[in-house]
């Protein structure tokens, strides 16, 4: 389509209609302009896959690298965008520290990342450091208050549902009925 001289608007329309493209117009515009610039400079055009930002985020965050196809895609993405290399290294170290419950490794990883000041992780690290001690305690202790929080959430939901319709004794009966 680029070689035929089609406009970016027509290329985007054709992609969305005929090829079920779900990406944005801006992504098509960037790709087409980059391709045209490379062609003008005489560079060889390499055929490569398009991956949306959403797919890249999902793949980098959730992929445990067990599937060969996903590993190949991650390697292609890291080769195409080398700025994501340190970010991906942080993600894998973060995932490993959490799954192995390694408090010391987690602490050193977060403090190292704070001093590195990577723009991809800066906001995340800053927010994490606001409650850093409770986070470290969660690594050290197996206990959780998740059950209690769930019961409080259920109580508040019942109160909202029964507001103005029932009395306190009915609320008590409904809460105790579910526990038994």
Image (cartoon, helix red, strand yellow):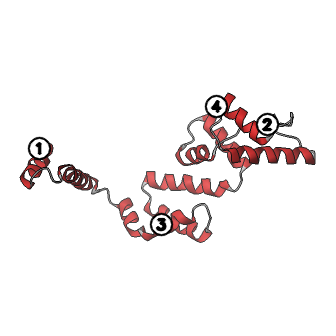
Label 4 neighbourhood size at 10 Å, few (<14), some (14-19), many (20+)? few
In the image, residue 151 above or below residue 136: above
- According to the picture, the residue beneath numbered tag 2 turns out to be 47
Q: Nearer the viewer, mark 3 or mark 4?
A: 4
In the image, residue 113 above or below residue 93: below
Earlier-in-chain disc, 1 versus 3 = 3
Taking 15 as reference, is 121 left or right? Answer: left
- According to the picture, the residue beneath numbered tag 3 turns out to be 127
| CA–CA distance in space, label 4 to label 1 | 51 Å
Q: Secondary structure at mark 4?
A: loop
Q: Nearer the viewer, mark 1 or mark 3?
A: 1
Q: Nearer the viewer, mark 4 or mark 1?
A: 4
| Residue at the image position 71 percent from the left and 53 percent from the top | 82
Q: Position of residue 173 (x, y in %)?
A: 8, 48
Quarter of the image where the C terminus is located: top left
| CA–CA distance in space, label 1 to label 3 | 40 Å
| CA–CA distance in space, label 1 to label 2 | 63 Å
Earlier-in-chain disc, 4 versus 2 = 4
Earlier-in-chain disc, 3 versus 4 = 4
Residue 20, numbered label: 4
Earlier-in-chain disc, 3 versus 2 = 2
Q: Secondary structure at mark 1?
A: helix
Farthest-out residue, left: 169
In the image, residue 178 above or below residue 97: above
Taking 36 as reference, is 119 left or right? Answer: left
- According to the picture, the residue beneath numbered tag 1 turns out to be 177
| Residue at the image position 80 percent from the left and 40 percent from the top | 7
- Are the residues at dot 4 and dot 2 in contact (C-beta closer than 8 Å)? no
């Amino acid at each position: 389509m680029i070689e035929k001289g089609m406009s970016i608007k027509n290329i985007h329309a054709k992609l969305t209609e005929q090829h079920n493209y779900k990406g944005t117009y801006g992504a098509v515009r960037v790709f087409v302009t980059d391709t045209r610039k490379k062609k003008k400079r005489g560079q060889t055009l390499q055929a490569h896959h398009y991956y949306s930002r959403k797919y890249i985020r999902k793949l980098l965050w959730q992929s445990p690298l067990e599937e060969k196809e996903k590993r190949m895609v991650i390697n292609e993405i890291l080769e195409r965008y080398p700025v994501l290399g340190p970010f991906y290294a942080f993600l894998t170290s973060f995932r490993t520290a959490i799954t192995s419950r390694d408090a010391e490794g987690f602490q050193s990883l977060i403090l190292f990342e704070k001093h590195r000041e990577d723009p991809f992780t800066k906001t995340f690290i800053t927010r994490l450091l606001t409650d850093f001690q409770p986070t470290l305690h969660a690594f050290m202790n197996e206990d959780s208050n998740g059950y209690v929080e769930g019961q409080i959430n259920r109580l508040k939901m019942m109160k909202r549902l029964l507001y103005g319709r029932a009395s306190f004794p009915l609320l008590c009966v409904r809460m105790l009925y579910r526990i038994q």
